[in-house]
Image (cartoon, grey):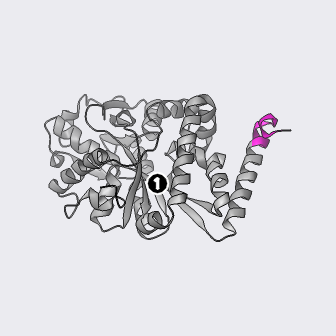
Amino acid sequence: MSIAKLPRRLALASLIALTTWAGTAAAQSGELLRIGYQKSASLLTLQKAQGTLEKRLAPLGVGVKWVEFPAGPQLLEGLNVGSVDVGFVGEAPPIFAQAAGANFVYIGYDPAAPEAEAIVVPKDSPIKSVAELRGKKVAFNKGSNVHFLLVKLLEKAGLKYADIQPVFLPPADARAAFEKGAVDAWVIWDPFLSAAEKQTGARVLADGRGTVNNFAYYLAERGYAQKKPQVIKALFDDSTERGQWLRANFKQAVALIAPLQGLEPEVVEQSLRRYQFGVKPVTAAIAAEQQKIADSFFELKLIPKAIRIADALPAGAN
């Protein structure tokens, strides 16, 4: 009997067992690809659940170790201290990390997803526009992709970053503060954004459309990227195939990802529809967009020094 014909729980158990076996067998060589991921990264969550990367890397004698982080800045810290080899984050974390001296390179990016991040307020909040955030407490994860979104939306509304009271909190703590009324607004990304909308009735003041790109980036420790191009290629090939599978099997993907993220299927479905999945090499044009963010952060004194994104590109990419 095939796994597809087994009862769902037994099939899942069998899949996990096969995945563990593949990873363990490959890891006997002593070589591991350590991937830093966030539970909110739906495609990587899918790859982890299905074990496709482990199977792809097994012929190379490479196992996979998945290391979860609550958000991008923490993941970049892990990359910088050597606890992971590659990671997947939003636009802002690499800029803060590069300014702090982290030694990594951009190895790929996912398409723009401006609708997948937004400023939200409680459903009964009197605040109706971004301009009304003057003097208000706004929660967000410092150094994350939404940090730049907030800066640009305030600018668009005629406000300065100094006009609001930033409250630096990771997603879980920010959600708690938001629900208790300890903050006036929350800047957050999906699937946390969709969860807040569906579960609390949170109202979107503005999302990234027309303001930011909200690209997501694959990063690698510089030495690892130079020494293991075949492993990086395998990761990209698997990510591309899983992205295609997700789009072709959307409902099945939702059903698989939802329990792993601890969210209702309708929340995951809304979140997934806001993202495009298709990793590509970082081009000069994409790097130029990232440079604009870095320059903006330096002008606001959010990073201690000016940086060149080109310095964090693989050899030959710039």
Q: Residue at horizontal 61%, vertical 68%?
A: 31
Asked if the stretch drawn in magenta spans residue 177, the answer is: no
Percent x, y for residue 110?
42, 43
Which kind of residue does numbered mark 1 sit on? Pro
Mark 1 surroundings within 10 Å by alpha-carbon count, few (fewer than 14), some (14 through 19), many (20 or more): some
Q: Main secondary structure of the magenta part?
A: helix
Percent x, y for residue 287?
29, 49
The residue closer to the viewer here, 180 or 100, is 100
Percent x, y for residue 97?
33, 62
* Segment tinted magenta in the rendering: 1-11
Q: Is residue 8 left or right of residue 188?
A: right
Q: Is residue 292 above or below residue 245?
A: below
Q: Is residue 281 left or right of residue 130?
A: right
Q: Residue at horizontal 19%, vertical 64%?
A: 305
How many numbered marks appear?
1
Read off the residue under disc 1.
Answer: 70
Q: Is residue 96 above or below residue 135?
A: below
The quarter of the picture where the N terminus appears is top right
The quarter of the picture where the C terminus appears is bottom left
State the image quarter where residue 60 is shown.
Answer: bottom right
Instruction: Give the structural element (helix, strand or loop) at label 1.
Output: loop
Q: Residue furthest front?
A: 316
Asked if the stretch drawn in magenta spans residue 9, the answer is: yes
Residue 79 appears in the figure: yes
State the image quarter where residue 311 is shown.
Answer: bottom left
Q: Is residue 57 above or below residue 7?
A: below
The residue closer to the viewer here, 157 or 254, is 254
Q: Residue at horizontal 26%, vertical 45%?
A: 289
Residue 35 appears in the figure: no
Q: Is residue 313 left or right of residue 271?
A: left
